[in-house]
Every structure is written in C-alpha cells, then in structure tokens.
Image (cartoon, rainbow, N blue to C red):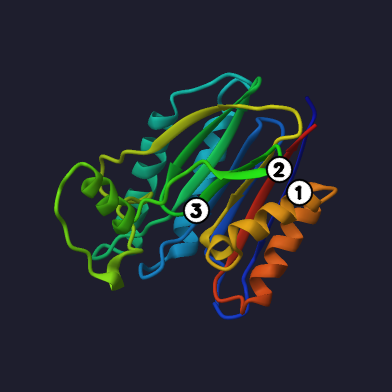
Amino acid sequence: MNLRSSALTDIGRVRPENEDSFLCNDIHQIYAVADGIGGLPAGAQASQMTIEVLGGTFAKYQSGLPVDYQSVIEHINDKVFLLGRVLSPQFGIGSTLTFAHLTGVKLNIGHVGDSAALRVRAKQIEQLTTDHTIENEMREREARGESLSLLMENRNALTRCIGQPPPILAHCSKHTVLPRDRYLLCSDGITRYVAVAEIEEIMLQAAEPQDAVKTLINRANERGGMDNSTAVVLFFD
C-alpha cells in the first residue's frame, strides 16, 4: 500500500497563541497531534515538548517495528511533568497526545486526553479514541452499576493529560490498515466545531490529504475559529 500524508495547524480567530503542535514524519511513519491544556499555563511549551520527545524517541527506533507504546508515553509524561515543575511549580503544565505509528499493515495508536483519531473505511467514519473526560469516565462507572452525579459545567474536564504527576495510563490500540482507508488525527479545535458527518464528507471528497486538512481547518474557522485547530491526515492507496 502507498501512504500519503499531510498536516496543518492554525491559530484560529480568537486565541492569542497557537498551543497545538503536530508531527508528520514519513521516514519513521509516526504521526501525532498535541494540544496544550486550556486553563493551565505554558500550553504551547507543553505540546511542543510532547511532540519533540515523541519524535526524538521514535528516531532512535528501527522504522517499521512496534514498540512499547505505554512506556513511550510514560517517558514523554515524565519529561513534560519535569518541565512543568520549572515553568509552573504551583499548577504544572499539560498537553493532550494522540499519535499513530505504522508498522507494516498495523496502525498503532497511543492516546491521552481529548484530541482524536478517526478512520473512514467503506464510506463510514469511526472514532478510534475516547476522550479522557469526567463525563466519559462517569458513564463508564455508571455502566458498571455505580450511582454517580455529574456537574454539567465540569463534564469536559480532562481526567488524564501528558504532564500529570506519574503514573499515567494511556489508551493504546492496534488497527489493521486496509486499502482506501483514510485516517484523521486532530485537536478538539476541529471536533468541537465540525460535525462528524461533515468530517466524513470532507475526508471522502478530498483528492489529496492536503485538501482534507485545509478544508477541515477552514471549516473550523468559518464557525468562529474559537480554538486552535490541527489536523494530520493519512490516505492509504
């Protein structure tokens, strides 16, 4: 199979700084999005270090071979946590991280936070990650029979992020890639403002990955550009 990729980030129309970062490395076939946590200081530095450590780590590995993804995320978390002790001793710093690493016909996904990985296959879109938010955690606990209450204003608060005090538990999964699959890694600046059905349509209609990333970001900005937006798109032929 042939892989075509493209990535783009945009500050949006409201925020004074872009706190998103991305990785699109065709040599080591590692792709990622990181989004500095709102409400914490130094969001840009947190996401930048997240991506820098991720890229540096995979540069040390032989391309095409799987690695211990949980350990990789723990290593990144330790580095960002220590930076937070310097930049913001009282509050710390934090970032989301969603990455995809291609090994043969397997796409290995690592995920912490509320950025997202989505796949379009046979004209159907599916989100491959679950946001690590209080709302989703409460739903999981309620599904186990626990009776809980949730304050609506806190439902989108993150329960995990890169830069938190160790230990960190990431969500790691493996997916078999098929011809004509299309994948999107993106920050919530896209998923909050572009409906899933629209994302599906944009991904299907795009002739090239760069067409998809530009259209997704333009669509988020048309809705007000309230947040930074970042997209990494992979097309498999």
- Element under label 1? helix
Return the residue at label 1.
Answer: 204
Residue 123, which numbered label?
Answer: 2
Q: Are marks 1 and 3 in contact (CB under 8 Å)?
A: no
Real-space CA distance between mark 1 and mark 3, rounded to the nearest whole angstrom? 21 Å
Sooner in the amino-acid sequence: mark 1 or mark 3: 3
Q: Is 121 or 90 nearer to us in this picture?
A: 121
Which of the two marks, 1 or 3, is nearer to us in this view?
A: 1
Q: For residue 180, what is the image quadrant?
A: top right
Quarter containing the C terminus: top right
Q: Are marks 1 and 2 in contact (CB under 8 Å)?
A: yes
* Image location of residue 195, percent across then percent down: 59, 62
Kind of residue at badge 3:
Ser
Kind of residue at badge 2:
Lys
Residue in the image at 78% along x and 24% along y: 1
Which of the two marks, 2 or 3, is nearer to us in this view?
A: 2
Residue farthest along the right direction in this orientation: 207
